[in-house]
Image (tube, helix red, strand yellow):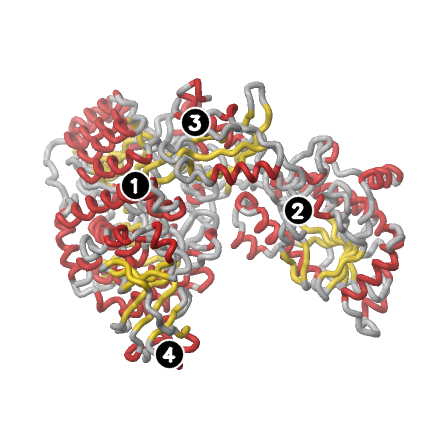
Amino acid sequence: MYSYSDFDAGFVRARVQQFSGQVARRLDGSLTEDEFRPLRLMNGLYLQLHAYMLRVAIPYGTLSPDQMRQLALIAETWDKGYGHFTTRQNIQFNWPKLQDVPAILAALADVEMHAIQTSGNCVRNVTADHFAGAAADEIEDPRPYAELLRQWSTDHPEFQFLPRKFKIAITGAPNDRAVTRAHDIGLRMHRNAAGEAGFEVMVGGGLGRTPMIAHTTREFLPVADLLPYVEAVLSVYNTLGRRDNKYKARIKITVHETGPVEMTRLIEARFAELRPLFGGADQALLADIRSAFAPPAFRIGPIDAYHAFYTADPTFRSWADTNLAEHRNPDYAILTVSLKAHGETPGDASAAQMRLLADLAEKYGHSDLRISHEQNVILPHVHKSDLPTLHAALMQARLATANIGLISDIIACPGMDYCALATARSIPVAQDIALRFEELKLEHEIGPLKLKISGCINACGHHHVGHIGILGLDRAGVKTTRSPWAVMPPKPPPLVNAPAPVSPTTRSCPPSSVSCAPILPCARPLQRRSSMPTAALVWHPSKPHSIRPKAAKMPLEQPLAPVAERVAELNARYRHHGATAVLERAMTDPQVGRIALVSSFGAESVVLLHLVSVIDRSIPVLVIDTEMLFAETIAYQAEVAARLGLTNVQRVMARRERLNFEDPDGTLHQFSTDACCALRKTEPLEAALGQYDAWITGRKRYQGSARAAVDFFEAEGDLRIKVNPLAHWGREDLEDYMVNNRLPRHPLVAKGYASIGCAPCTTPVKPGEDPRAGRWRGTEKVECGIHFINGRAVRVPKETA
Amino acid sequence: MKAPRFTPKVVTANDLLLGDVVYLTADDLWSRQHHQAELIEDEAHAQMRLLHGTAQRQVVVGAYLADARTGPKGPEPVHFREAFRTRGPSNYNHGKQADPSDV
Amino acid sequence: MSVIVTDAGFAPAPDQIFVPLADLANHQGAVDLAHTDDPEVLRGHLGNVALIRIAFPAFNDGRAFTIARRLRMMGYTGQLRAAGPVIADQYAMLRRTGFDAVEIPDDLALRQPAAQWQARADWRAHDYQSRLRA
């Protein structure tokens, strides 16, 4: 394997010195925390839930026994005796102290390791096929290219402050074991018609909030063009990538918004400028690196012992069946050591286990260890005759679990046990599932099945690319120690299929055998659609309405006066009138124009719906369906519409394409309730109201302090009048009205909900609380944002709302 | 314009050197124990205390207000995330839970 | 007021008239670029511009690094100056991407004195890029 040159060693030492200085300057005030944060991040140091966390790179997943032993030493000396192998070929230490970190980095440098660029908005640790150099289907070992990329990206002066992090994965085999299409840049080696090896370059893939499959920008890139081409991609991204919204800052969004064709054109143009700058030094270096990755001297010897054990020992056989993969040398096997013992933390290894693995690799594995993105340790070159001895040694250390590729071989992120970003715990879920299937003794019968768990939308557990993906969510800070969980459908289609390789032609297609029914994190839309009594709700295509047929069919005889003038006049005239008079006027006056009622069918909506239905049952009633509503709300809409005989109920929804892009898995509300309201309520409503001159709302003065100044008539810029007939009604008035008219109540009212919005952002309120206190609880948010200034829906700052 | 109703809060952060979870007490110290935190019932006072916490840049990192409520020993966390922060991870007996005096 | 940082240390910023890109026609040798400007516009003018100053609105907005690299790729040989609240730790990156000097606000110069910048005046050392691009 690659050994540091003097240059590498000098660089890493200098870097440790720099970081020591940065820590000292943070402590003496030269650097603010805002300035220090990106510096510590680009040296792998995070501040997590309970402590700092140091993420150490394991470039292309390759470790020597000495390096593994040093990781064990670090775990014991400065941490709590264990390390966590991640889904990106890193190891994380969960308990370092800030002042110890320079010493840890120095200890890493002693064994040619570092934590550089394992975080921050820079090019991250380059990952590679964990079977590299051993797999039977490989064209070329991808690790020399990964090492070249490591050197190129390390401290690259232009790309340390990118719009967002940048991940590169590389595979030297046509079968993708490195999830290349879910990376910012994926590199897949293949041969062209002339038989030369080169790369298919894929740009703009990724998981996270907006999972996307990468686009191929170059079908065949000669290996000598690798660095200038990758640099061209980064250079274009650094210029075009969005910096206004961190959730839209990854290159996948840049490709999506720029378009793959234009993006390809820009990359190729930049490549043409950059190519001449690489005069061959990189290729000379590559040749040196390549020689360091020469295959080991494979042993020739009988493998009878292996066959004998395989036949005689069912435990060994079961382990061999799941944990071994085909090696290019038929006398050898690739051994995957499971770090997924049932009930243990996926990906964790104790210092003792690390040392044992180092010893075994030295003795039986040509001193080569790998870390897979599936959080296991691999001995890539094991002579089959050594497997029985190896198995026995691994059993002693609880490292012989026979579950690779099975349901208990779970990928799980650290979740809210450690991670500051997580919204739920994932480790206990993984532990419970693994123990349950161990108890059932079913997993070998079920066969290969990839289960992946992420504790938040950032998808470190790769939950989009498994047969079953589990995403942990926090629904509006539910006061419970049990985190609610939602099973996500795997989308986009699974990309990898190791250890059972996918053929090149189907590489981006989902495995046909497994699918799972989606249970979306909101309002159970599937059940809801099928159980909805559709007869009661008549959905019309949106059409303007006025109860005066004349006004509906032809333009008004005279142009309307400016909105502000009419509003002032209407308010003056109706100051002392009641809701019914206001409504009648609003629904008949040509000076009001085309009008619709907007209703949430919430806790008190039935009052206004009833008042309106008495005047005209055919008025358009716009219902905003955020697709996040309570099932009870949907049922209640149908019931009320039927009871009141409303004949023109129209459902207003966000466009499917917008939802797919902005909130593909329905969790936007966790990150920005404002953005979620804008997407699902404000924008669709603004579009629907475009054809009306006025709309009726149920806003009341007593609701929320932000609404204390609500008038009967309000101007929305110069486009539209907002009519609030219930502005002056109090809580008791509404109660009385509902009782006196025997109106059906929203079923959730009985459960303590006083104001009902979308399921994730609504909780019950306690007696005496402001009725809207249950909306967006725990946030500063008080209004849904359906407010218009100058005719445009805008978010009204709290101070002015 | 105020939020609908102010709910009681504590000021919490992480210790700059150790990374440990800490809480601001009424006498301006940082305690490792949630129940020793100052329970803040008034919104204006909460903002003052948060400013006070944030200003101690050489002592703590990332101060913020977390919901809390009165308990038998003192303030208790409301959200499960904050409850986790008072203890430690679920998979090992590490963090505050390892030292009973800190829970 | 602001301070100019070079390999030699701190110096006061001299008076000079910069024109924004939009006013390129009236330049007197010095041009200001925003971090969002396309340096391509300057192609054809590079020979008679002696100083280009590129804005960093914040130290963690890295667009100006690419602008500097592109100007140098286009053959610009005049002075290139970064202007804004960049931090001493970025000095080597700035020099390596083609900047000659950095113009920082006085308060930053006070908090991060010349010694902290000169600690990275060794920017030619330990530079992977110079090994890969020959």
Q: Which residue is mark 1?
A: A24
The amino acid on which the numbered mark 1 sits, given as a three-letter code, is Ala
Q: Residue at x 35, y 30 (%)?
A: A340
Q: How far separated are the C-alphas under marks 4 and 1?
A: 44 Å
Q: How far separated are the C-alphas under marks 1 and 3?
A: 28 Å
User: Within 10 angstroms of label 1, few (less than 14), some, or many (20 or more) residues?
Assistant: some
Mark 4–mark 1 contact, CB under 8 Å?
no
Q: Chain of mark 4?
A: C
The amino acid on which the numbered mark 3 sits, given as a three-letter code, is Gly
For this view, does A289 lie left or right of residue A735? left
User: Within 10 angstroms of label 3, few (less than 14), some, or many (20 or more) residues?
Assistant: many
Counting residues from the start of the chain, the first of labels 2 and 3 encountered is 2
Count of numbered circles in the view: 4
Q: Which residue is mark 3?
A: B88
Q: Which residue is mark 2?
A: B1
Q: Which residue is mark 4?
A: C27
Q: Secondary structure at mark 1?
A: helix
Q: Chain of mark 3?
A: B
Q: Residue at x 33, y 41 (%)?
A: A28
**Of the two numbered discs 3 and 4 in the rendering, the one whose residue sits closer to the viewer:** 4
Q: Secondary structure at mark 3?
A: loop
For this view, does A41 lie left or right of residue A540? left
Residue A325 position within the rendered picture, expressed as x and y whole percent measured from the top left: 26, 37
The amino acid on which the numbered mark 2 sits, given as a three-letter code, is Met
Residue A776's image quarter?
top right
